[in-house]
Each structure stands twice: as C-alpha cells, then as structure tokens.
C-alpha cells in the first residue's frame, strides 16, 4: 500500500473537496471558496482555460477540411460521441474507445471530460421547476416525494440567475415560474405569427422566447452575446455562462481554490470511527500514481452516471454495497428527457421579411398538458415544446431542388420559405429498473470497473411522444403551415444529455440517498448536487436546478460546519 | 465457383431482406407501403443487385484513383454551380473538398459507388459523343450530366430510401450534395456566393428583404 507521511498529509488536506468541475461542481467550488474555505476542485480531464483553450472559436466555415463531416475513422473510434459532435467542437467530447461503458440497451452517454465539463457545450436553457413538478410524485404515488417545494428553492433560483445572467420574458405562469431576467431576445416573423395563432386558439398555451444563459447585455465582465451562434466551441466574448468563463475564475479569485485536472476520483474514503467521509482517493492520469486527499466535507458533482458509479465503487465494511447506500437506491431511477417527437412545416407568408444575426436560441411553448385534474390523457406529467423558425438556407434546400446549373445556383443561394421545426422535451418517470451498475469483471485502462447502463423509455413516455407529435402538428396546421411533417426520431436514452436520478433526494433514508439539503442521509459530510440528486425529471432543462440546489447545499454545509455539526 | 456464388446469393438476399424490414420499420410505413416495400425487394434485386457488384463494392477505392479524376470532378462541380455574377465551384476549389470528404468521410461502399459513377460517366461520353468527357463542349457535358441526373433516383420515395440505405446515394445525388456543401462552406462561396456575417454583434428579428438578397451562409 501507499505510504503517506504526515507532511504530505498536511499538504493534502483541505476544508472541502469538490469532485467534478462541470456546471454544478463549478458552483460548489465558487460558493465554498467565497465562504473562505480552502477548496480542492478535482477534474478527471484536462484543463480548459477560458478564451485561450477555445481553438475553433474564431474559425470560419472554410477552415474545416471536411466541413462539418466527421471522418469515418473518427466515427468508428467514437460511435456514440460522434453522433453529437462535429469537427468544430469535437475537442470538448471524450473518446469512446478510451472511456468505454456497456449498453444493456442502446443509451448515448455523451460526455466532456475537461475542466468545465459539459458546461462548455450545454444548450443554455434555464427553466425553473414549479410545485406542479415537486408535488407530482407524492400526488401520483410514484417513486418518492421530493423533500423540497418551490418556496425552498425559489430564492436560490434568483441567486443563480442573477449571477449567471439569463435572458428571457416574464409570462406569469404557475407551471413555469418567472425568474430574474435580462431583456429577452426577440422572436422572428414566423415565430411571432405562430405565437399569435397559438394564443388565439388555446388559452392554456403560449409561445415565448427561450430563456437562455446568453447575455443580452454585458454582465459580470462578460458578454454581451455577439449573435454568432457558435456557443459549443467556447465563446471568446464570454457571451454565455460556463464554469470556465464564470464560476471557476470567481473561485480562483478568492485565493482559496486549488484546481487539479487529470485526477480521476476512484472512491470516497470512509472513516469508520468518526462515521464520516475523510477524503478521496484519485488516480493521476498523467503519472498513473494514486493519491489521497482529505477534507471536512466532500461535494460530489461528477455527473449523474459517474457519481453513482463512483459511490458504488466506494465500499467499506460499513457500506459493502456502495457509499451511503443503505437504501440500495444508488444507481437506480435513471432518467433522461425524451426529445424525439415533434413537427415541422413551411409557411408562405412573410416572403419579404428576413433577419440579421444568429440568435443562439429558439422559442418555448411551456407545458400545457396535465395542468388540471381530469384531463383524461393516456400519460402522466407533460412536456414543453422547443423549436425555432427560420428561412430555408442552402443546407435545407439541397435535396429539394432538382437539376443543376445557374438557375439551381440562384435558388440555392437565396432565402427559401419560412419554416418552423419544433419538438417536445418530455418528462421521463423514475423507474427503479432503469439503472446503472458496475460490471463485476471488465475494467477500463485505469483498472476501474466499467459502468453498465440499462435504460429504456416506457409506455408513459411513448404515449407522450404520440401526443407531442399530434399537438405539434395541429398547432402548425392551425397557424397555416404547409408540408407539415410530424416525426418521432426514436432517439435512444441519453440523447437529450439530461441524465438524472441515480442518487435521489427524499425524506426517508430507507428509500432515498440524500435529504432535503442534498446531504447524504448516512454520511453527513457528503453532499451530492449534480443531476444524480433528482427525484423526478419534470420536463424543464435541468441545469438551472442543479446550480440552485448546489448554491443552497453549499450554504447549508457551511453553516453546519460552522456550528460544529459536521 | 457456381455453388459458392449461389450460397452467397442466398445469404446476401437474406441480409438484403432483413435490411429492408429494418428500413421499413425505421421509417414507420403503413401496411400498404409495407407491401410496396416487398415489391421493392424484387425491383431492386433486378435493377441494381448482383453478388459481383456487392463484393466489388466492399473493396476500398485507392485515394489515388479519385485524385486522378480531379479534373473531371472539377468540371462536373462547375456544371452544378457555375460561375455567374458570383464565383463558381471550380474557383472555390470544390473538387478538392469533394475528394477529401469522399475519401475520409464516406463508407467504402459509397466511395465505390461514386467512383464507378465517374467511370460510367466517362464511358457514356465515349459511347455517345465519341470523345473524352473533358474534350466535350459545355453543351455536351451538360447533356451527359443531365443523363445521370435523370437516372439518379427511383420515382418511388420508399424505393429510393431503401436503395440509398443499401447501396449508398446515387452518383449524381452524392456529387450534387458534396458540390453544394463544398461550395457553401468555401471562402468564395461563403463570402461571395452567399451572405456572411462573421460577427453580427446584434440580432434583428424581422427586417425587410433587400433587393437581390442572398441567403446567410451560416445559421
């Protein structure tokens, strides 16, 4: 075994350790550092520094030898990740060959192992959950009740929104509470037309501009957004929120942060005598050496699947089945939103109108299903519809235009008809049998067990998809769209990149892992605030909720520590 | 030899049918379209399927063989997107793009289909105009390409989908797609053929279309 001297031990001891530097880990690090805690932020991938490590951010379309096509070799090496990246942002995704996992059923586990994680490539949509969501499990007797309600998290939503900068329009809806918004981006002609039609035809529905963490004015020394719509390459203007552009520099500025990339946390260490976590063990991926670090509290933000895997891998005589896993729920109840079903169409009006600039967002039709009792639908919960309107450009037209030559060229290079594409982002119920587990035999190149993912959408989700298809098609038809095509892409789980739920919050230690402050029921100095904590998925994009829960848990952890309770 | 071919034929026909079942499932056709699909098996088998062709299509195309055809590819691309008041495909270097993407980003079967399409086109020029394609005048070249455009696709949409899935896109469709992509991503295509706004700085949601307004090059 490894020998650790007292001197080394002293150097390896911090007030807090945060595992993972993505959207929630960045928040934990900043909050804890700002409270004066010496914090070690561990990241399994490489460092990505804001501005300087965005190699493609200023490139033009012609700078990519193969355009936006991924080479065959690349597709073979990365059969999962290459479905999501292209040559402009590939460097923010992992290599599948290097980071294998086992799919019991098709599941796209899309990952970015680097400082900032997937906050570099996220969709930036920021929607609050409401009590319709927090009360749903209890009301319907599904899974377990959320241990919090909207009033518990509302001030923390405000706190986070005020820091990251969210542009959006207040709409005064109970199912989608308003937030602290910067001025909204504008809807274009066809989107306004669709919004008017929806308002006229159904008083339960409306279409609003997306609420996004893109800055419509300068904010916190970042931005404003330059309307290039190249966010996933990293923004040279800091026009959108990421850990790299915002929370990590803020944490660093306190002088309390130690950032350690290339550090895979293999397990959390349990102190049997004190009944607490004492720290973590890591593998340094540059030297392949093993190190231990110690702290008073640990925040786990490794992402839903990896967090559960790491906990299951952390065994001790107290926790033979995984760290803090007396409930045997760790790894179970995996969720991902579905976003496969929707509709598109073209419109003949507004042929003399166009737009300038590339708005990095679309529109939102907030949830309108099951807002009331007795709706008699064949599914529970609901979905919100996200989409965008635009005029057809060359890439949309190429397959529809026949012939070749100068007429073809003229048509190809002028704006085509207005179109709208929209799809439903739908709630996925928490099913015990949707789960991750560790493979007993197979290991990765660092000797760590491979993760097996066993996930499928079920009847409730499939019925909802059918409804999305129908309702989307209807809304377009009522608004006078032609060539309305309703679709269901049937994408596998994971494709929406909203994995949630493997380490759920709940009121009862027998049936849940975390309490109402994201504190482990069984190990009081461990807090888990990434997507794994989610008790249900709702249909809203979840990152804003992770950030709010993280800020709230950080405050709680700090107070508990100060009061000598940890 | 005969027996081997027979066995291979049966095996491939089986794979062929399984493929079509899957394709049909994937595109969610109704019962009538499903029956059409069964008919499609027969049609495709007669028109474009042979064991020899299949085996051939699974061999890779040496990059050098495509580079040798660069002048023809450049000529074809220019026929699709000619120079007008803005630069054409040739000036934009689209031939280079087409070869790069064909070699590196396309399955072997698609590469082969493309290459044999070029060969067919050269042969068609010799057979019908008694000279090399490159020696034909513009009008003749256009007629030759038109022939391939006319025979690029089945009129039946489902048949097309199945054919594309099994054998790759037709020579003409692939050529056209890559030409458009190469042109609309090239420096000249982006900045002169289309309208390019490198850093827009602001978003104007609804503005009147300008006379001779070109499409935005990027979304």
Image: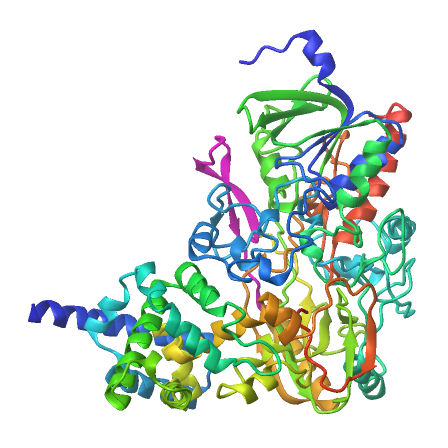
Image location (x, y in percent) of residue A384: 74, 70
Residue A451 is inside the magenta segment: yes
Q: Is residue A153 magenta?
A: no
Which residue is at the front of the view, A169 or A217? A217
Question: Which residues fall within the magenta stretch?
Answer: A433-459
Give the residue drawn at x 85%, y 72%. A186
Q: Is residue B210 above or below residue A178?
A: below
**Front-lying residue, A76 or A509:** A76
Q: Is A139 left or right of A1, judged from the image as shown? A: right
Task: Provide residue A471's location: percent of width, then percent of height.
Answer: 69, 81
On the image, which quarter does residue A381 sit in? bottom right
Q: Is residue B123 left or right of residue A169?
A: left
Question: B31 or A342: nearer the eye?
Answer: A342
A106 left or right of A503 in image: left
Vertical placement of residue A417 versus A507, above or below: below
Q: Is residue B217 above or below residue A264?
A: below
């Amino acid at each position: 075994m490894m020998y650790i001297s007292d001197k080394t031990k002293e150097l390896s001891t911090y007030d807090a350790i945060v595992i993972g530097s993505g959207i929630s880990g960045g928040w934990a690090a900043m909050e804890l550092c700002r409270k004066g805690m010496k914090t070690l932020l561990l990241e399994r991938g490489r460092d990505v520094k804001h501005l300087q490590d965005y190699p493609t951010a200023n490139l033009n379309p012609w700078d990519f030898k193969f355009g936006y096509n991924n080479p065959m070799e690349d597709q073979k090496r990365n059969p999962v990740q290459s479905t999501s990246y292209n040559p402009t942002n590939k460097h923010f995704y992992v290599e599948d060959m290097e980071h294998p996992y086992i799919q019991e059923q098709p599941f796209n586990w899309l990952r970015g192992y680097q400082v900032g994680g997937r906050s570099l490539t996220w969709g930036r949509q920021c929607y609050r959950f409401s009590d319709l969501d927090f009360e749903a499990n209890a009301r319907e007797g599904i899974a377990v009740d959320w241990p919090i309600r909207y009033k518990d998290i509302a001030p923390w939503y405000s706190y986070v929104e005020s820091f990251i900068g969210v542009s959006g329009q207040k709409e005064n809806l109970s199912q989608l509470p308003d937030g602290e918004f910067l001025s909204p981006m504008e809807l274009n002609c066809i989107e306004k037309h669709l919004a008017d039609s929806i308002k006229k035809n159904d008083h339960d529905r409306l279409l609003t501009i997306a609420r996004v963490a893109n800055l419509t004015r300068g904010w916190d020394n970042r931005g404003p957004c330059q309307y290039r719509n190249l966010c996933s390459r990293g923004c040279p203007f800091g026009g959108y929120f990421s850990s790299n552009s915002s929370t990590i520099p803020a944490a660093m500025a306190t002088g309390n942060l130690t950032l350690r990339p290339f550090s895979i946390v293999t397990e959390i260490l349990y102190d049997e005598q004190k009944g607490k976590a004492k720290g973590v063990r890591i593998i340094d991926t540059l030297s392949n050496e093993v190190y231990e670090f110690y702290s008073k509290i640990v925040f786990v933000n490794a992402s839903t699947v990896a967090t559960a895997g790491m906990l299951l891998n952390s065994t001790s005589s107290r926790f033979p089945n995984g760290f803090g896993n007396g409930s045997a729920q760790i790894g179970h109840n995996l969720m991902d939103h579905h976003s496969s079903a929707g509709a598109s169409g073209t419109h003949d009006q507004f042929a003399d109108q166009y737009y300038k600039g590339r708005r990095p967002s679309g529109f939102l039709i907030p949830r309108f299903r099951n807002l009331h009792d007795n709706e008699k639908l064949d599914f529970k919960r609901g979905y919100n519809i996200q989409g965008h309107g635009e005029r057809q450009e060359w890439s949309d037209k190429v397959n529809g235009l026949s012939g070749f030559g100068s007429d073809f060229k003229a048509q190809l290079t002028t704006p085509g008809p207005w179109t709208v594409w929209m799809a439903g982002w739908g709630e996925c119920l928490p099913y015990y049998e949707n789960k991750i587990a560790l493979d007993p035999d197979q290991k990765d190149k660092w000797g760590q067990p491979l993760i097996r993912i066993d996930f499928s959408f079920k009847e409730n989700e499939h019925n909802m998809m059918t409804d999305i298809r129908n309702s989307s098609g209807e809304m377009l038809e009522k608004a006078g769209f032609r060539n309305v095509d309703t679709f269901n892409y049937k994408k596998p789980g994971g494709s929406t990149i909203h994995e949630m739920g493997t380490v759920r919050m709940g009121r009862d230690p027998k049936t849940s892992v975390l309490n109402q402050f994201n504190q482990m029921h069984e190990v009081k100095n461990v807090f888990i605030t990434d997507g794994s904590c989610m008790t249900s998925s709702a249909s809203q994009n979840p990152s804003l909720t992770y950030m709010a829960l993280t800020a709230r848990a950080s405050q709680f952890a700090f107070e508990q520590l100060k009061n000598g309770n940890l | 030899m005969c027996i081997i071919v027979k066995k291979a034929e049966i095996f491939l026909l089986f794979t062929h049918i399984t493929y079509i079942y899957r394709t049909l499932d994937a595109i969610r056709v109704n019962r009538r379209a499903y029956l059409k699909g069964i008919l499609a098996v027969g049609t495709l088998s007669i028109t474009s399927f042979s064991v020899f062709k299949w085996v051939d299509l699974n061999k890779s195309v040496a990059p050098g063989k495509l580079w040798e055809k660069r002048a023809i590819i450049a000529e074809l691309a220019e026929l699709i997107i000619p120079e007008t008041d803005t630069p054409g495909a040739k000036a934009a270097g689209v031939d280079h793009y087409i070869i790069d993407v064909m070699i590196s980003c396309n399955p072997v079967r698609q590469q082969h289909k493309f290459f044999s399409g070029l060969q067919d086109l050269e042969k068609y020029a010799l057979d019908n105009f008694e000279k090399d394609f490159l020696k034909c005048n513009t009008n003749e070249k256009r007629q030759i390409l038109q022939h391939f455009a006319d025979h690029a696709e089945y009129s039946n949409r489902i048949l097309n989908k199945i054919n594309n899935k099994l054998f790759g896109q037709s020579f003409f469709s692939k050529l056209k797609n890559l030409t458009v992509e190469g042109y609309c991503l090239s420096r000249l295509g982006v900045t002169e053929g289309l309208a390019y706004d490198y850093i827009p700085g602001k978003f104007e949601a609804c503005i009147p279309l300008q006379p001779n307004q070109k499409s935005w090059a990027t979304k």
